[in-house]
Amino acid sequence: ETGVTQSPTHLIKTRGQQVTLRCSSQSGHNTVSWYQQALGQGPQFIFQYYREEENGRGNFPPRFSGLQFPNYSSELNVNALELDDSALYLCASSLDREAFFGQGTRLTVV
Amino acid sequence: RKEVEQDPGPFNVPEGATVAFNCTYSNSASQSFFWYRQDCRKEPKLLMSVYSSGNEDGRFTAQLNRASQYISLLIRDSKLSDSATYLCVEENTGFQKLVFGTGTRLLVSP
């Protein structure tokens, strides 16, 4: 497969809670991007990390935050969950021209 | 106006048919374009990059028209396994910060 793994694969949370999603990048890939894909829509760019620094952000509120670690793995944190946060969350790691996506975490907020 | 617009379909075609998808983009400064394929409840996977000169990979041909700001994908001799959602993607704000269309769903029937 792509060598990018995400955990957990599925998650159910209650409105107002906080969630942390994890991504293990393909070996050597120093850039990781996170995307949100709502049902019936294309993925939307949340933010990108390059060598542990945020390197660009899409149109998402500050309650969406992230981290990248020295081994280039990454986390997406979402605070104060809302019902509209229910979506497939994808991370993509890249080194050169191609982005490799993980299988995603399906988050349901009830 | 959305940055990348696609007809969501679905396109229903018989095996062996030729089918074409178009998408339009709004940012004339965008440099790189791609087609990704996404199977139901799976992650997107790169199908091919799109160049102004056009490029072909087996049964798939992609074309970029910068003057009209549209991108096309042609699939010849459709197979059942081509059934998927095809996402038109541009990279317009920096390395691997991808902007996706909503996707066009293709259903190939026997």
Image: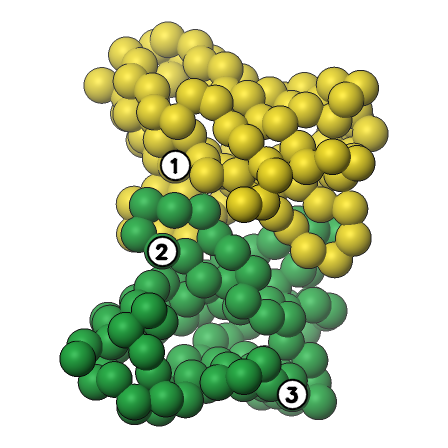
In the rendered image, residue A22, in percent from the top left (x then y), is placed at 55, 21
Say whether marks 1 and 3 touch (CB < 8 Å).
Answer: no
Q: Position of residue B74 (x, y in %)?
A: 46, 86
* Residue that label 3 marks: B54
Whether callout 1 and callout 2 share a subunit is answered no
Q: Residue furthest top?
A: A17
- Which chain contains the residue that carries disc 2? B
Circle 1: residue type: Leu
Q: Which mark is residue B79?
A: none
Give the amino acid type for the residue marked by disc 3 in the picture. Gly
Q: Which residue is mark 2?
A: B39
Q: Are marks 3 and 2 in contact (CB under 8 Å)?
A: no
* Residue position for label 1: A88
Which quadrant: the C terminus of chain B? Answer: bottom left
Is residue A85 visible in the rendered structure shown here?
no
Helix or strand or loop: what does disc 1 sit on? Answer: strand
B9 to the left or right of A1: left
Residue B59 vs B97, above or below: the answer is below
How far apart are the two marked residues, 1 and 2, measured between alpha carbons? 13 Å
Which of the chains is green? B
Give the image location of residue A110, x and y in percent.
22, 19
Q: Amino acid at mark 2?
A: Asp
Image hue for chain A: yellow
Q: Is residue B87 left or right of residue B97?
A: left
- Check chain identity for marks 3 and 2: say if they share one: yes
The answer to which of A110 and B109 lies nearer the viewer is: B109
Chain for numbered disc 3: B
Instruction: Classify the position of the N terminus of chain B by image quarter.
Output: bottom left
Instruction: Count the marks.
Output: 3
